[in-house]
Image (tube, grey):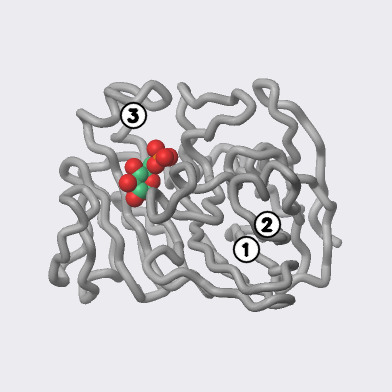
Amino acid sequence: MSLSVEPFEQRGLSCVRLRHPGGATADVSLHGAHVLSWKPAPARERLYLSPNASHAPGSAIRGGIPVIFPQFAARGPLTKHGFARLLEWRFAGLRDATPFGESAVFELDDDEHTRSLWPHRFGARLHVALSADALQVGLEVINRDESPFAFTAALHTYLRVAKLAAVELCGLESTPYEDSARRSAPMPASGAPVRFEGELDRVYANAPRALGLRDGDATLHLDAEGFRDTVVWNPGATLAASMGDLGAGEHLRFVCVEAGTVVDPVTLAPGERWLGVQRLRE
Ligand SMILES: O=P(O)(O)OC[C@H]1O[C@H](O)[C@H](O)[C@@H](O)[C@@H]1O
């Protein structure tokens, strides 16, 4: 095993810090199995965490990598983005037998509370693997019920940017999208990298897996497996200023590039498993 794990507390949240011998770290809160920080090198934070994020029990943390399950946004009867990001997960330790090799594993199983919201028996596992220059996060869902169930899910990744006006997301040039900021209007492929010039909220169905986020001279490489869709979000100035857990000007510091299965739900038969992975690499 090359990773080490240290428990710590951050603003009342129980967290674990994964440390790679090369110096990279990733911090994960048990609240939501939420990755709060990824630093490929000690002074290089790649995720955005709002300074105004709520850390209260039962609320969602603004920033990092929220785990969205079993419902994306308002695409169903549950609370927006489902309950996984609002609940306490268990840290099951480091494991070597997962699809990634060595990773930290976090677990959420159905209980009376989840069944009162969503009447299914399930296991959800978040696998977090760290190498010298990459972070891999995998969401695994297991159907423990006697009948099939369907869900939508995403890793709602907030990527820190240095200069929003210079940011371009490459790889989605040829993919049509739904414009969620304009009542889900269907839009043709734009033919150009995505630029962030105001509120932007798009769902790219069956999107290419490999994307590049250019921020001035630096490029972050993203890719995904299992997740079919990509969601791209930035609230823009007006919406950011109106959000209590964000605030004026905070939209300039991140873009969300989310690996999701949001358009067509995944259906799992009893005993079946599904895995969706997002990889971020410098
Ligand atoms: O405010 P939240 O519930 O965390 O949602 C934040 C955002 O998530 C996704 O990116 C959706 O596409 C947006 O419509 C939503 O506003």
Task: Evaluate if marks 2 and 1 touch, with contact meaning CB atoms under 8 Å apart.
Answer: yes
Percent coordinates x, y for residue 206 in the rendering: 35, 76
Query: Which residue is label 3 attached to?
Result: 250
Please name the amino acid that badge 1 sits on: Gly
Confirm whether residue 127 shows in the render: no
Relative vertical location of residue 134 with respect to residue 82 in this rendering, above or below:
below
Task: Give above or below for 250 relative to 178.
Answer: above
Residue 140 percent location from the top left of the image:
66, 65
Q: Nearer the viewer, mark 1 or mark 3?
A: 1
Q: Residue at x 69, y 58 (%)?
A: 124
Establish if 201 lies above or below 12: below
> In the picture, residue 275 is in which quadrant?
bottom right
189 and 186: which is toward the camera: 186
Q: Which residue is mark 2?
A: 126
Assign the N terminus to one quadrant of the image: bottom right
Q: Secondary structure at mark 2?
A: strand
Circle 3 residues within 10 Å: few <14, some 14–19, many ≥20: many
Q: Residue at x 44, y 43 (%)?
A: 80
Distance (Cα) linking label 3 and label 2: 28 Å
Which label is found at residue 176? none
**Front-most of residues 182 and 8:** 182
From the viewer's perspective, is 133 left or right of 110? left
- Which secondary structure lies at badge 3? helix
Q: Look at the numbered disc 1 and give the secondary structure of its residue.
A: strand
The answer to whether 223 appears left or right of 20 in the picture is left
Q: Quadrant of residue 134?
A: bottom right
Res 138 label:
1
* Labels 3, 2: front one: 2
Q: Indicate the amino acid at tag 2.
A: Leu
Residue 243 sits in quarter: top left
Mark 1 vs 3, N-terminal side: 1
Amino acid type, label 3: Glu
